[in-house]
Amino acid sequence: MFQLDIILKKGNNLAIRDRTGTSDPYVKFKIGGKEVFKSKTIFKNLNPVWDERVSLLVETLREPLYVKVFDYDFGFQDDFMGSAQVHLESLEHQRSSPPLLFLAVCARKNTVLSFLFVLKVCNQSMRLSDVHKKSQLWRGIVNIGLIEGRRLKAMDDNGQSDPYVRFRMGHQKYKSKVLAKCLNPQWREQFDFHLYEEQGGYIDITVWDRDQGRRDDFMGRCTIDLSTLARERTHKLDLPLEDGAGVLVLLVTLTATSAVSISDLSVNALDNPYERHQIAQRYGLMRSLINLKDVGMVQVKVLRAEGLMAADVTGKSDPFCVVELSNDRLQTQTVYKNLSPEWNKVFTFNIKDIHSVLEVTVYDEDRDRSADFLGKVVIPLLNIQNGVRKAYALKSKELTGPTKGVIFLEIDVIFNAIKASIRTINPIEQKYIEGESKMSKQLLLQNFNRVRRCVMVLINAGCFINSCFQWDSPQRSICAFLYVLVVWNFEIYMIPLVLLLPLVWNYLLIASGKDTRQDQAVEDLLQDVDDDFDKDDKDSERKGFMDKLYAIQDVCVSVQNALGEVASYGERIKNTFNWTVPFVSWLVVVALGVACILLYYIPLRYMLLAWGVNKFTKKLRSPYSIDNNELLDLLSRVPSDVQLVSDA
């Protein structure tokens, strides 16, 4: 193995790619078709100075190092500015080589990049597995709390704005929610970025005004230099916006990373009894109140795949596997020209939320374009059987049906139940920025049918109650007449007691073998799923319908998403009582039992008084706390019927 040290110094006379006569250049380095490093973006500069350092482990010198320069365009595809390549075999070992690389395919002459290369031979006795085990994939975590904006610029005719914020750190992105008609928005959002560089990095922040039917307006930008912030403490930053007006208020915390790593199959922690015992002690009940964010750990052994789809014209594929847990993403090496690859890698993640879903996706590598999708598996952490080697059938992108091939995995999950319970009633971790929602006639109809099913449950309940009043069934009406006795003896503690009854009833049905989770609604939903999910959307785009009714599309998307949200919460309430997620259902049983006891012994007025004092003083005790609703956070951990179909 060889160690290649690269110092990216500067660029001179780069190509113009923006209308303003400048560019926002950044540099990508690739070896063997894989991106190995990406520089920061220098805004509005044709002679940028980076002064960035990176050390790479190289197994062979036969593969050239490709250097590509791009112009960063926010919200659009980045523009290509030029490329060059370095033949590693031509570099002298242990000596600095400062070449000037002339970029090819560039609109301006004498365009050069300035580098410094140092090539060293690594210790041959060091195994690759040891390198992977000892090196962390990321060096730390950056926790960002977006609190508020002050005195932002008015962009609309009514003297207001609809601001939202975009964060970017390398390939990691995050988009805040849109707050309508305000110049002093209160976002109160929180998310994490991975820190890959030991000396820190830069976070680019831009503020935009949302405009329906046309391009969003730019309101300003600012940058955070993480190298200037101390670790293991929270920094309150008031950042003035450049090229605009106003201030952003952020809370930024840099913490050391937990044990996130890749290793060979022969080197992993849980196979060592002593290390396994140490990990189990770390997440034991005696340490339940220490570091509440560290809920547990999961170890994924990606063994092999069989019968994959042929993606290349040669009838073969170049498969690699990507493992994702929330916003943590690791991948295996590529096995070339093989439909039954063996990876034999072990991935270790820290669990922030026990209700997270493990996603394992197989891709086919293509050197000069994006990777081709081969198949995907989605596994909820709570459904994992520890230490069991299983073959999972790969599914399509939408998880609506199977695709060709299976993948063999062995997964172990260790977590602290008390930490997991506390985390359950806190806001769920948001995924990094995702694509904008598109209008889909079939998805709109599906969400409408889901809401209709929830409404029909309420209507049927009303009809049942009315039939009791009409004496359609004398036996049922006589039993219902006991309502008078219930009202006469009613106490407030009986409310959680009544809610416990359907939980107990469904648990008994499941224990007796009558599983109610796969009900008719899920079967109907499976029948509604079509293989050509977006066929209608593509046809409508070809006919130009979406171009003519762009404004109507935004309204339809909003209605579509609102229907989906309403249906999801209705289905989640039903699935909570159906014991779809036993962990959550047991949590509800405990909560309702405690509520029943408290309401029996403590007058309701005292509890309302305590609740009111807590709510009124929360802002005084923690001015920058993130607002949340514990009940909605709890329900968000229960899958809807659509998610049940995807996980099935």
Image (cartoon, rainbow, N blue to C red):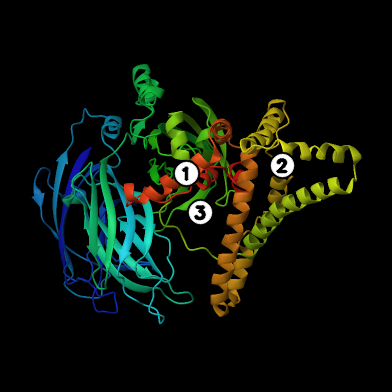
Residue type pointed to by label 3:
Val
**Dot 3 alpha-carbon crowd within 10 angstroms: few under 14, some 14 to 19, many 20 or more:** few
The residue wearing badge 2 is 519
When asked about the image quadrant of residue 578, the answer is: top right
Left or right relative to 296: residue 585: right
| Viewer-proximal residue among 466 and 192 | 466
The residue wearing badge 3 is 313
Residue 137 place in picture, x, y as percent: 30, 40
At x 39%, y 21%, the residue is: 271
Residue type pointed to by label 1:
Leu
Residue 102 place in picture, x, y as percent: 19, 66
Residue type pointed to by label 2:
Asp
Residue 84 visible somewhere in the drawing: no
Q: Looking at the image, do the residues carrying marks 1 and 3 touch, with CB atoms under 8 Å apart?
A: no
Q: Quadrant of the C terminus?
A: top right
Q: Nearer the viewer, mark 2 or mark 3?
A: 2
Q: Residue furthest left?
A: 95
